[in-house]
């Protein structure tokens, strides 16, 4: 009985919430309101600024550092669980991979702001 009452209340609430937009609809179909919003860009201006390549590089480097932190964060916990003879080679391998990647990015000029 209680379940039926709750179900009917939920159905009534859903019907009311689905009908409210149709009852309160205003007609604002102007060019300004029907154009998509693009984060502060003027949609009617023809020449826009180019996408910043430096911003893209910083975003990619941020993702690399996120993955690096995800890999390095559990290592102190592992230090208590496994012997140092196993832990040390794993830690050195991870750090060598990260340092080689950093040197590669540096030599290719990915870390410089002037392109």
Image (cartoon, helix red, strand yellow):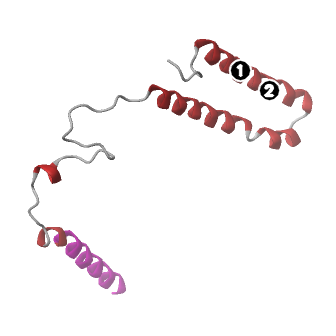
Disc 1 element: helix
In the drawing, what numbered circle is on residue 27? Answer: none
Image quadrant of residue 48?
top left
Q: Residue at x 16, y 54 (%)?
A: 33
Q: Position of residue 66 (x, y in %)?
A: 62, 37
Q: Position of residue 20 (x, y in %)?
A: 18, 72
Magenta range is 1-19
Please name which of the two marks, 2 or 1, marks the residue nearer to the observer. Answer: 1
Q: Residue at x 81, y 44 (%)?
A: 77
Decide: few, some or many residues near mark 1? Use Cα within 10 Å; few <14, some 14-19, many ≥20. few
Q: Nearer the viewer, residue 104 or 98?
A: 104
Disc 2 element: helix
Q: Is residue 103 left or right of residue 89?
A: left
- Asked whether 75 falls inside the magenta stretch, the response is no
Return the residue found at the far bottom: 1
Q: Residue at x 71, y 20 (%)?
A: 97
> Label 1, on which residue?
97
- Asked whether 14 falls inside the magenta stretch, the response is yes
Asked if residue 74 is positioned above or below residue 95 in the image, the reply reads below
Disc 2 + disc 1, Cβ < 8 Å: no
> Label 2, on which residue?
90
Q: Residue at x 66, y 38 (%)?
A: 70
Location of the N terminus (image quadrant): bottom left
Q: Position of residue 11 (x, y in %)?
A: 25, 75
Asked if residue 92 is positioned above or below residue 2 in the image, the reply reads above
Q: Main secondary structure of the magenta part?
A: helix
Image quadrant of residue 75?
top right
Q: Position of residue 101 (x, y in %)?
A: 66, 19
């Amino acid at each position: 009985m209680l379940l039926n009452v709750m179900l009917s209340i939920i159905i009534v609430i859903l019907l009311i919430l689905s009908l409210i937009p149709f009852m309160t609809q205003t007609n604002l179909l102007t060019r300004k309101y029907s154009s998509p919003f693009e984060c502060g860009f003027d949609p009617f201006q023809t020449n826009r600024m180019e996408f910043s390549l430096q911003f893209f590089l910083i975003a990619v480097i941020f993702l690399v550092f996120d993955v690096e932190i995800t890999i390095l964060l559990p290592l102190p916990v592992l230090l208590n669980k496994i012997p140092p003879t196993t832990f040390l080679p794993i830690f050195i391998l991870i750090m060598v991979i990260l340092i080689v990647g950093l040197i590669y990015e540096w030599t290719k000029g990915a870390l410089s702001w002037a392109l």
